[in-house]
Amino acid sequence: MIGISESQPDDLASIERIYPAAFPDEDLLPLVRALLTQRSTVLSLVARAENAVVGHILFTPCTLIGQSARIALLGPLAVALGHQHQGIGGALVREGFTQLEESGVSGVCVLGDPQYYRRFGFAPTETIAPPYPLPPEWKEAWQALAFSNNALPLSGTLSVPTPWQEPALWGP
Ligand SMILES: CC(C)(COP(=O)(O)OP(=O)(O)OC[C@H]1O[C@@H](n2cnc3c(N)ncnc32)[C@H](O)[C@@H]1OP(=O)(O)O)[C@@H](O)C(=O)NCCC(=O)NCCS
């Protein structure tokens, strides 16, 4: 039985074990730690199975430069090895969407594998520009979705808080 809830400060050690195993070639821990120090603004959800943390997702509140609409940036997302392909990643994404929409967020952006993210309604976007130019081969990986047609068109350049202002996060 999987339960999704907001992460607690005590979950940090478990979260810190999941990322290096799920992303052996990428060190996302500095980003995760920096975002979690802004716990009051980010949405940080964990999936628990029998009281162990087996998945984690972060959503960072952002805006489009010069606009008031709130847009969330999804990432990172990781599920513990041995618990992948059981619907946990999907459950984390969908619970995040529910909470964000209820709190008045207009849409979500993500830089990730379109094959995975399209199932949630994400589609490559050219109307929302990422905060740093992406390499051409990552064009399809920059995706967005709006929670309601009223929020369309979401268009502008995404303004991200300090932990995301790291060009290395936006390139290979
Ligand atoms: C990607 C990840 C978060 C998905 O979580 P999960 O709990 O395993 O995924 P779910 O069970 O909700 O969904 C499984 C589906 O995702 C697909 N999937 C899993 N990882 C994928 C990936 N990296 N790329 C594309 N599709 C992927 C599976 O093929 C499966 O598809 P199907 O339902 O059509 O068979 C998890 O596998 C993970 O942490 N992987 C390592 C880190 C990573 O690659 N993160 C990418 C996020 S940008």
Image (cartoon, helix red, strand yellow):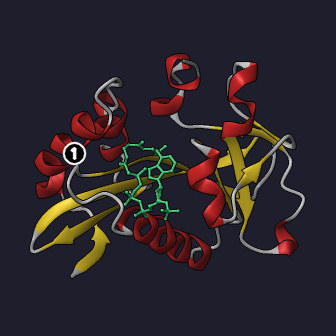
Q: Is residue 92 shown left or right of residue 50?
A: right
Instruction: Say what amino acid the circle numbered 1 marks.
Output: Ile
| Quadrant (top left/top right/bottom left/bottom right) for the N terminus | bottom left
Position of residue 16 relative to residue 77, above or below, is above
Q: Give whichever of 59, 110 is nearer the camera.
A: 110
Judge: label 1 CB < 8 Å from ligand 1.
yes
Q: Is residue 133 visible to the viewer in this orientation of the structure? A: no
Q: Is residue 143 shown left or right of residue 22?
A: right
Q: Look at 55% across and 70% down and name the residue there.
A: 97
- The residue carrying pointer 1 sits among few (fewer than 14), some (14 to 19) or many (20 or more) residues within 10 Å by Cα, namely many
Q: Position of residue 141 (x, y in %)?
A: 66, 38
Which secondary structure, mark 1? helix
Per the image, the residue denoted by label 1 is: 18
Report the label total.
1
Q: Is residue 158 shown left or right of residue 169?
A: right
Q: Position of residue 127 (x, y in %)?
A: 87, 43
Q: Give whichever of 97, 85 is nearer the camera.
A: 85
Q: Look at 72% across and 60% down and name the residue there.
A: 145
Q: Look at 51% across and 17% down and name the residue there.
A: 168
Position of residue 115 relative to residue 93, above or below, is above
| Quadrant (top left/top right/bottom left/bottom right) for the C terminus | top right
Q: Position of residue 40 (x, y in %)?
A: 37, 57
Q: Is residue 25 shown left or right of residue 98?
A: left
Q: Is residue 139 visible to the viewer in this orientation of the structure? A: yes
Q: Look at 15% across and 56% down and name the residue there.
A: 11
Q: Position of residue 62 (x, y in %)?
A: 62, 48
Position of residue 68 relative to residue 163, above or below, is below
